[in-house]
Amino acid sequence: MLQDNAQIAREMYEELFTNCNTAVLDQYVDEDFVYINPMKAVRGRQQIADLVDAQRESFEGFHLQVDDFFVSGDRIAVQWTITGKHVRDFFGTPASGGSIRFSGVTIHKFLNGRSVEATGYSNMHEVFALSTGE
């Protein structure tokens, strides 16, 4: 099952962040999914779809590169880097118009072939502070 979860996670990131296909959330994410990150908690498939859409709309040329993958039991850690041009407000940070690049790690817990929870960490606020001069 470990290999299956790893493959599922890879496909999920490809569909959500490369293909911007939120229709696959039913397939990869539990209906009670919870994503905790420094900005706010995101609950359920619709809020995840809204987050993915907000990223795509806020960062022109949005690109999420999966840098590394770690599997341990029912947990999968995804190390990633996001690049783009900050053209719209994102989580209360006004658009800077500048290019951004930030990295992070999201740790997923899988159950029955679906991600049931995730915790994300990134240096996003540090990057936004630099891009806005604050």
Image (cartoon, grey):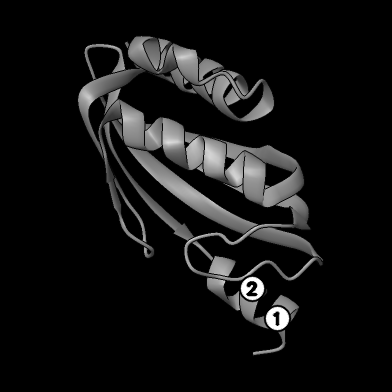
Instruction: Give coordinates of residue 98: x percent, y percent.
Output: 81, 67
One can see residue 71 in this view: no
Dot 1: what SS? helix
Q: CA distance from mark 2 to mark 1?
A: 6 Å
Instruction: Give coordinates of residue 37: x percent, y percent.
Output: 36, 57
Report the residue marked by disc 1.
132
Residue farthest to the left? 32
Instruction: Give coordinates of residue 107: x percent, y percent.
Output: 38, 43
One can see residue 17 in this view: yes
Q: Amino acid at mark 2?
A: Phe
Above or below, 17 relative to 29: below
**In front of the other: 80 or 33:** 33
Above or below, 48 relative to 45: below
Q: How many marks?
A: 2
Please indicate whether residue 41 sits to the left or right of residue 25 in the image: left
- Label 1 near label 2: C-beta < 8 Å? yes
Above or below, 42 relative to 29: below
Report the residue marked by disc 2.
128
Q: Amino acid at mark 1?
A: Thr
Q: Residue at x 77, y 51 (%)?
A: 84
Q: Residues within 10 Å of mark 2 (few under 14, many from 20)?
A: many
Quarter occupied by residue 49:
top left
**In front of the other: 52 or 65:** 52
Dot 2: what SS? helix
Q: Quadrant of the C terminus?
A: bottom right
Q: Residue at x 73, y 57 (%)?
A: 87
**In front of the other: 111 or 86:** 86
